[in-house]
Image: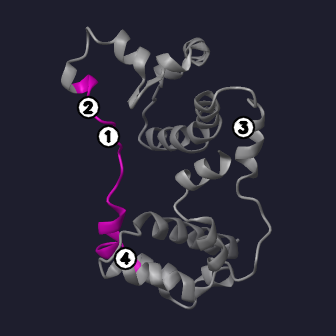
């Protein structure tokens, strides 16, 4: 289960990561997930995955992004569905009230059925993704060239440039959308650059 969720949550497959590295690594990128999943060893697969999300994806990704962006603009945000009593109650519910076939959030949909129109209740989940792919081919192309193409990039002290360039070239040629991968690589490069300045 841990390996499947790790691949589902990652932009790079494990074999891609190993090929990117200039030196082989014995690090276990899934160790954190394994540790969290051990805490709920006897629970159902759905309960374990929800617990993993609650302990990792929310505090380490979604909530921190929301907090930083709202604070940067002088806003205070709240996540009412993450109220402690409510999350504890939701966590205690049986799987059948959370997931039924391909229908998610079963009990939430039932609770709000009289308040929300059917077109919204039945609508697919919609994220807030940004068009990284298009940006990297246009206004952010110089960043990609500086951080992911230039032989002087600090990234290439750790990663094999010959393995990075195909992602850049395929993306720029429109053969694939590697926007998320390029974002990860550019972020790593900028972070390495900031370390060298300090």
- Crowding at dot 3, Cα within 10 Å, few <14 / some 14-19 / many 20+, comes out as many
Q: Quadrant of the C terminus?
A: bottom right
Between residue 168 and residue 12, name the one nearer to us: 12
Are the residues at dot 1 and dot 2 in contact (C-beta closer than 8 Å)? Answer: yes
Q: Place residue 141 in its image quadrant.
A: bottom left
Residue that protrudes farthest toward the bottom in the picture: 151
Q: Earlier in the sequence, mark 2 or mark 4?
A: 2
User: For the residues carrying marks 2 and 4, which lies nearer the camera in this image?
Assistant: 2
Q: Position of residue 92 (x, y in %)?
A: 61, 14
Q: On the image, numbered disc 2 is attached to which residue?
A: 123
Q: On the image, numbered disc 1 is attached to which residue?
A: 126
Q: Secondary structure at mark 3?
A: helix
Q: On the image, numbered disc 4 is attached to which residue?
A: 171
Q: Secondary structure at mark 4?
A: helix
Between residue 159 and residue 98, name the one nearer to us: 98
Tell me where the magenta segment starts and ends, as one range. 120-142
Magenta highlight on residue 127: yes
Q: Is residue 131 above or below residue 163?
A: above
- Crowding at dot 1, Cα within 10 Å, few <14 / some 14-19 / many 20+, comes out as few
> Tag count in the figure?
4
User: For the residues carrying marks 3 and 4, which lies nearer the camera in this image?
Assistant: 3
Q: Position of residue 145 (x, y in %)?
A: 43, 83
Q: On the image, numbered disc 3 is attached to which residue?
A: 37
Are the residues at dot 3 and dot 1 in contact (C-beta closer than 8 Å)? Answer: no
Spatial CA distance of label 1 from label 2 is 8 Å
Q: Earlier in the sequence, mark 3 or mark 2?
A: 3
Are the residues at dot 1 and dot 4 in contact (C-beta closer than 8 Å)? Answer: no
Spatial CA distance of label 1 from label 4 is 24 Å
- Crowding at dot 4, Cα within 10 Å, few <14 / some 14-19 / many 20+, comes out as many
Q: Position of residue 80 (x, y in %)?
A: 47, 19
Magenta highlight on residue 14: no
């Amino acid at each position: 289960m841990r390996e499947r969720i790790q691949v589902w949550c990652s932009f790079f497959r494990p074999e891609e990561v190993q090929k990117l590295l200039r030196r082989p690594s014995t690090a276990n990128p899934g160790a954190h997930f394994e540790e969290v999943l051990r805490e709920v060893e006897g629970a159902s697969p759905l309960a374990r995955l929800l617990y993993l999300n609650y302990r990792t994806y929310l505090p380490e990704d979604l909530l921190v992004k929301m907090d930083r962006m709202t604070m940067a603009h002088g806003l205070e945000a709240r996540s009412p569905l993450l109220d402690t009593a409510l999350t504890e109650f939701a966590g205690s519910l049986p799987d059948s009230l959370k997931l039924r076939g391909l229908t998610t959030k079963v009990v939430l949909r039932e609770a709000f059925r009289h308040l929300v129109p059917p077109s919204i209740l039945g609508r697919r989940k919609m994220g807030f993704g940004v068009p990284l792919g298009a940006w990297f081919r246009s206004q952010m192309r110089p960043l990609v060239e500086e951080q992911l193409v230039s032989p002087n990039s600090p990234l290439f002290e750790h990663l094999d440039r010959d393995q990075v360039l195909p992602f850049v070239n395929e993306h720029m040629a429109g053969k694939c959308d590697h926007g998320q991968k390029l974002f990860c690589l550019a972020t790593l490069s900028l972070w390495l650059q900031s370390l060298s300045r300090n």
